[in-house]
Image (spheres, helix red, strand yellow):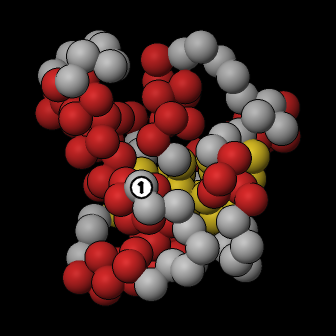
């Protein structure tokens, strides 16, 4: 299973297509197995960005979420274990959404697809794929 970082999901759904060839191959392979996941926190982050005027979704955040789930994305819920794990991620930047998305990937033993250089450089055994590669 792979978990998409918020901006990677936005690239996939809204463009521009910034995916690297290798990242696209990884996502396509996971998609055929029904294993492309989104942390519930990603929907919160996208809705927040839309509310602040920093992002324009094609519909309300709720409708957008429903469309993505109907298309086949898997939503991974946030729970107490994930929330606590997010606090204990030493060396990870303090961005709460990033911490919760990473903790979600770790909790589900999934790889993370991201273009965030801080997440890619973080020293941890979490499997990461650079969305630009």
Q: Is residue 58 above or below residue 29?
A: above
Quadrant of the rendered image containing residue 65: top left
Q: Position of residue 115 (x, y in %)?
A: 66, 41
The residue to which callout 1 is attached is 95
x 52%, y 61%: residue: 93
Q: Position of residue 20 (x, y in %)?
A: 80, 31
Q: Is residue 8 left or right of residue 123?
A: left
Q: Is residue 40 above or below residue 56?
A: below
Q: Position of residue 5 (x, y in %)?
A: 51, 47
Q: Is residue 61 left or right of residue 96?
A: left
Q: Is residue 103 left or right of residue 43?
A: right
One can see residue 119 in this view: yes
Quadrant of the rendered image containing residue 80: bottom left
x 50%, y 35%: residue: 7
SS of the residue under disc 1: loop
Residue placed most toward the observer, 84 or 17: 84
x 46%, y 17%: residue: 14
Which class describes the residues within 10 Å of circle 1: few (<14), some (14-19), or many (20+)?
few
Residue placed most toward the observer, 35 or 6: 6
x 44%, y 61%: residue: 94
């Amino acid at each position: 299973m792979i978990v998409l970082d918020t901006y990677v999901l936005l690239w996939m759904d809204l463009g521009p297509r910034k995916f690297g060839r290798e990242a696209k191959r990884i996502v396509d392979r996971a998609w055929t197995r029904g294993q492309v996941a989104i942390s519930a926190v990603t929907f919160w982050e996208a809705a927040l960005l839309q509310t602040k005027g920093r992002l324009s979704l094609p519909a309300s955040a709720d409708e957008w979420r429903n469309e993505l789930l109907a298309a086949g994305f898997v939503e991974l819920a946030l729970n107490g274990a994930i929330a606590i794990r997010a606090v204990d991620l030493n060396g990870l930047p303090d961005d709460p959404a990033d911490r919760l998305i990473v903790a979600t990937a770790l909790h589900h033993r999934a790889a993370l697809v991201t273009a965030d250089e801080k997440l890619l450089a973080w020293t941890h055994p979490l499997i990461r794929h650079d969305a630009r590669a």
